[in-house]
Image (spheres, rainbow, N blue to C red):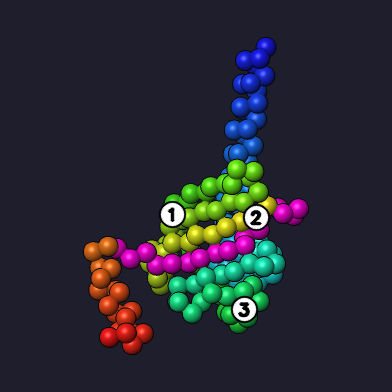
Amino acid sequence: MRVLILTTLCLLCFYSQGSEDEKVSAVIDSLHQYAAQAKFNEYFELYSAGATFIGTDASETWTLEEFKNYAKPVFDRGSGWTYKSRERHIYFSPNKDVAWFDELLDNASLGLTRGTGVLVKTGSGWKVTQYHLTIPIPNDIADSVAEQIKAYNGMH
């Protein structure tokens, strides 16, 4: 009987974890979908009130309001940005109320990019509290890119 109870508990934990993975993944998928469709309200409803967006440029660490101000004119033109997930990993805090992820994304103008972020579980579901978009630089060209950035920033 103990084995049956223990097995049942383990299965419940497994399926519970799976459903949380699916919920978090659905939020991230919706984030990409709404951005591509320029659905401003739906896109920003996926963020928590104190969210931060960190873009590819060193100057782009935005509060939610700053990010909305950046995105509004873009979305108003009817075009957002399109990123297709190639590979995603999701992780959870021990009490399962915080999730973080990393994913490789394809974008028509930037090519391969990486999105990372943190979601918090709220009374109304999972919300993005931080999103960070980067351009992964292959190690073989990292020195050259670093030199270009230094030159651009006047460090040489």
Per the model, the C-alpha gap separating discs 1 and 2 is 23 Å
Circle 1 or circle 2, nearest the eye: 2
Q: Say which amino acid is labelled 3.
A: Glu
Judge whether residue 102 is colored magenta. Answer: no
Q: Which numbered disc, 1 or 3, marks the residue that appears first in the sequence? A: 3
Q: Say which amino acid is labelled 2.
A: Val
Q: Which numbered disc, 3 or 2, marks the residue that appears first in the sequence? A: 3
What residue span does the magenta drawing correspond to?
A: 122-138
- Residue at label 3? 66
Seen in the picture, residue 90 relative to 111 is either above or below; the reply is above
Q: Which numbered disc, 1 or 2, marks the residue that appears first in the sequence? A: 1
Q: Say which amino acid is labelled 1.
A: Arg
Pinpoint residue 32: horizontal percent, then vertical percent.
55, 62
- Residue at label 2? 120
- Residue at label 1? 86
Q: What secondary structure prevails in the magenta region? A: strand
Q: Residue at x 41, y 64 (%)?
A: 113
Pinpoint residue 37: horizontal percent, then vertical percent.
59, 68
Q: Secondary structure at mark 2?
A: strand
Quarter assignment of residue 127: bottom right
Left or right, residue 140 beside residue 57: left
- Local packing at callout 2 (Cα closer than 10 Å; few below 14, some 14-19, many 20+) is many
